[in-house]
Amino acid sequence: MKNLSKRLGTLALSLLGIGAVIIIWALAVRYTRIGLLLPSPWEVVKRFAYVCSHTIGKKYTVFGHLLISLKRVLIGFAAASVAGIILGISMGRFKMIEAIFRPIFEIVRPIPSVAWIPLAIVWFGIGENAKFYIIFMAGFVNITVNTFAGAKQVDENVLGAAYMLGASKLQAFFRVVIPSCVPYIFAGMQVGLSTCWMAVLAAEMVSSTAGIGWTITSGQENGDMVQIFVGIIAIAVVGLLMAVLMRWLEKVLCQWRERGS
């Protein structure tokens, strides 16, 4: 009951904060010159409801554009997760692999995902492969960093105890190393998913004919500020839902070492 009461209190404060922002926004648009630049919240809500059943552009409603963006993100994120987990664990557990790949990784690590957009277009054109590559690079770094940290944090005493009890190297790897890395992997995947979502939006704004990032660019080109805000709100809601989903998965799969909320 205490936990439920605490969660309800947190939810109430969150809704109160969102409500306060909306009220301030509405008052600012109505009573100040900011209304020349920004639409009112009610205009945005009306347009959002409209584009749920009417197309933005020639083909897709707002949900269609969101699904296109999500498909791109999931493909790039899945590839980044597989590659990042394999490389992170390999560097963390095998010194030779760390010596070979870590210097290369440290060179690539500081490069922001948007910096890869021009190269991606040159290498892959303006099609889907360029977007997948940009998304991959956005998620790969965060997932690798956290997985590497988890692999380095494996308790060697527990590993030694497993060997003493007769576990083979393969058994110790899957029953000690992997479970120890899982909370770190999920931490990296949560950050990686957010960066992948941001990366696909940037990629769609540069070269795309559909997707939620494209709706913002289209609104900018047409001077339609309401459409821009519709796209921004859709991005925020989906980003929040993805973060909540990742936290839920982490809670289910890592009950023995749940991170603080």
Image (cartoon, rainbow, N blue to C red):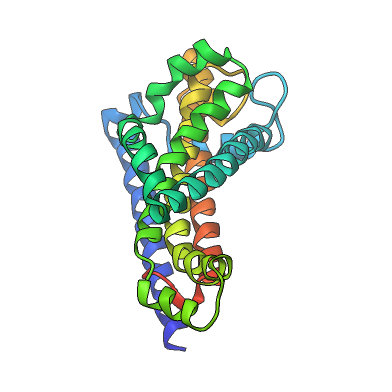
Quarter occupied by the C terminus: bottom left
Give the quadrant of residue 66: top right
Residue appearing at x 46%, y 57% in the figure: 185
Residue appearing at x 53%, y 51% in the figure: 242
Residue appearing at x 33%, y 29% in the figure: 111
Residue toward you, 171 or 127: 171
Residue toward you, 58 or 104: 104
The percent coordinates of residue 75 (x first, y second) are 62, 38
Q: Is residue 21 visible?
A: yes
As drawn, 75 above or below 186: above
Residue appearing at x 53%, y 18% in the figure: 218
Left or right: residue 32 compared with residue 173: left
Left or right: residue 32 compared with residue 185: left
Left or right: residue 166 compared with residue 54: left
Residue toward you, 257 or 12: 257
Q: Is residue 226 visible?
A: no
As drawn, 110 above or below 150: above
Left or right: residue 62 compared with residue 81: right
| Number of numbered discs | 0
Give the quadrant of residue 207: top right
Furthest toward the left, the residue is 32
As drawn, 96 above or below 133: below
The percent coordinates of residue 2 (x first, y second) are 42, 87
The percent coordinates of residue 231 (x first, y second) are 52, 33
The percent coordinates of residue 96 (x first, y second) are 39, 45
Furthest toward the bottom, the residue is 1
